Image: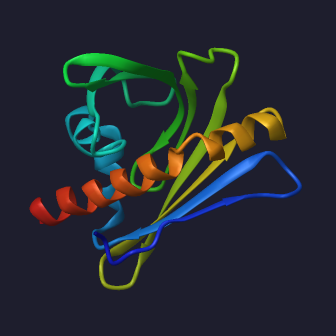
């Protein structure tokens, strides 16, 4: 379990979800874990699933896709586009679950340098309406986010 708390908040006035988490690693290392497909697959999502990257072109204008597997069976596929990749500072991408292809989240990730070589990662996810946002919040996404970030902590500690 991590010593860092993940804050997940839904805005009352606009259909957004903000996720804020600090890591004991410099922004370039946290950023790399988001754009290197081998690293990303090691930490994203809950511990009960494995991630298999199927497309990955982490550059402005690129695309990405991955599948989640449990016990060798594919249970979910996600895909999107990299709208902006600004090294060590910011990623803007779309995020779509194949099971709901009409629902697209636009996510902005910012990597803020903190004292002591640490990073504050802030993700702002914007969706089309409150019903979609509330469905995402109720889906158990917090488990995937929290367990994924705990795995990212472990990965960053191992690579230090």
Instruction: Please determine whether, in this image, residue 157 is positioned above or below residue 37.
Output: below
Judged left or right of residue 140, residue 129 is right
Q: Tell me which residue sits at (16%, 66%) in the image.
A: 157
Judged left or right of residue 52, residue 15 is right
Q: Is residue 150 visible?
A: yes
Residue 8 placement: quadrant: bottom right
Q: Tell me which residue sits at (26%, 35%) in the image.
A: 41
**Residue 105, x across and y down, in percent:** 65, 33
Looking at the image, the residue that sits furthest to the right is 13
Identify the image quadrant of the C terminus: bottom left
Q: Is residue 29 visible?
A: no
Residue 118 placement: quadrant: bottom left
| Number of residue marks | 0
User: Nearest the camera: 2 or 56?
Assistant: 2
The chosen color scheme is rainbow
Looking at the image, the residue that sits furthest to the bottom is 115
Instruction: Please determine whether, in this image, residue 86 is positioned above or below residue 4.
Output: above
Judged left or right of residue 79, residue 15 is right
**Residue 76, x across and y down, in percent:** 42, 21
Identify the image quadrant of the N terminus: bottom left
**Residue 82, x across and y down, in percent:** 50, 29
User: Nearest the camera: 138 or 79?
Assistant: 138
Q: Tell me which residue sits at (18%, 56%) in the image.
A: 155
User: Nearest the camera: 1 or 110?
Assistant: 1
Judged left or right of residue 90, residue 56 is left
Q: Tell me which residue sits at (29%, 48%) in the image.
A: 32
**Residue 14, x across and y down, in percent:** 85, 50
Instruction: Please determine whether, in this image, residue 28 is positioned above or below residue 118.
Output: above
Instruction: Please determine whether, in this image, residue 121 is positioned above or below residue 47.
Output: below
């Amino acid at each position: 379990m991590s010593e860092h708390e993940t804050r997940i908040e839904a805005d009352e006035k606009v259909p957004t979800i903000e996720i804020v988490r600090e890591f004991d690693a410099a922004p370039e290392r946290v950023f790399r874990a988001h754009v290197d497909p081998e690293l990303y697959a090691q930490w994203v999502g809950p511990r009960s699933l494995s991630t298999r990257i199927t497309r990955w072109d982490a550059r402005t204008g690129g695309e990405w896709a991955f599948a989640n597997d449990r016990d060798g069976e594919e249970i979910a596929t996600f895909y999107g586009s990299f709208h902006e990749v600004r090294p060590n500072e910011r990623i803007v991408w779309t995020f779509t679950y194949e099971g709901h292809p009409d629902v697209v989240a636009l996510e902005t990730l910012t990597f803020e340098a903190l004292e002591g070589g640490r990073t504050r990662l802030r993700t702002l996810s914007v969706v089309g309406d409150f019903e979609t946002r509330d469905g995402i919040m109720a889906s158990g996404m917090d488990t995937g986010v929290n367990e994924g970030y705990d795995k990212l902590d472990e990965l960053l500690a191992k690579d230090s």
